[in-house]
Image (spheres, rainbow, N blue to C red):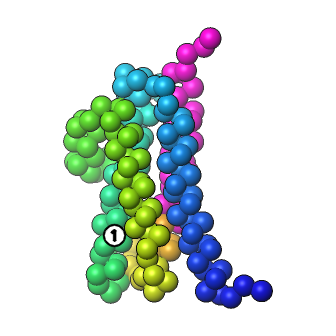
Amino acid sequence: MKSIAESGRQLRESFVERLREHARDVRRLTEGLDDDALERRTVPDQWSVAELTCHLWRVQQLFEERLDAMLASDEPSFESYAPENDPDFSRFVASRRGGEAVAAWLDAREQFARRLDRLTPEEWCRRGRHPTFARFDVEFLIEYMGHHEAHHVYQIFVRRLPLLRKP
C-alpha cells in the first residue's frame, strides 16, 4: 500500500507530465504549418493557432509569477486574469511570428516543467488567495493550469484542421 506522501508525489508528477504532454500535442499539431497558416484565424473573431499558443505562454508566465509569490510569502492574493484586459497580451502576440511563438513556448514549457520537478513537497503545499478559488495551494494551481490548457489544446486541434493540405 502506498503512503500518503508517495501518492501525493505521484499525483504531482502526473500534473507536470500533463503539462509536458500538452507541449508534445502542440508540437505535433503545429508541425508543418508555416507562419501564415499558424496566424490565420480559421474561425472568425476567434484566436488563431499562434494566438492560442501565445495565450498558453502568457498564462504560464502569470502562473510562474503566482508560484514565485506563493513561494516567497504566506498566502499572497491574486486577481482574476482576463486576456482582454491584459495590454501585455496584445503586445506579446504582435512581437513574434507564429513558428517563433510556438518554438519559444515549447522551450519555456520545458523550463517550467523542470522547475516544477524540483519543488519540494512543502513547496507544493504553499498557499495563495484568489477571488474565485478562495485559498488554494501550488498543487491546485498546477492542476488548474492543466485543465485550462486542455481546453485550448483542443481548440488548436480543431482550428488547424482547415489549414491542413489535402493530398
- Callout 1 crowding tier (Cα within 10 Å): few <14, some 14–19, many ≥20: some
Q: Nearer the viewer, residue 44 or 149?
A: 149
- Quarter of the figure that contains the C terminus: top right
Q: Is residue 80 above or below residue 151?
A: below
Q: Which residue is mark 1?
A: 66
Q: Measured along the vertical axis of the image, is residue 54 above or below residue 61? A: above
- Asked if residue 48 lies left or right of residue 152, the reply is left
In depth, the one of 78 and 131 nearer the eye is 78
Rendered residue at 60%/80% (across/down): 8
Prevailing secondary structure class for the magenta stretch in the rendered image: helix
Task: Give the image location of residue 132, x and y in percent.
Answer: 44, 69
Identified at 48% across, 25% down, the residue is 32
Q: Secondary structure at mark 1?
A: helix
Examine the structure image and report whether residue 41 is included in the region drawn in magenta: no
Q: Position of residue 26 (x, y in %)?
A: 50, 41
Q: Which residues are magenta?
A: 143-167
Q: Quick one: 110 or 39, which is closer to the camera?
A: 110
Q: Could you say which quadrant of the image residue 64 lies in?
A: bottom left
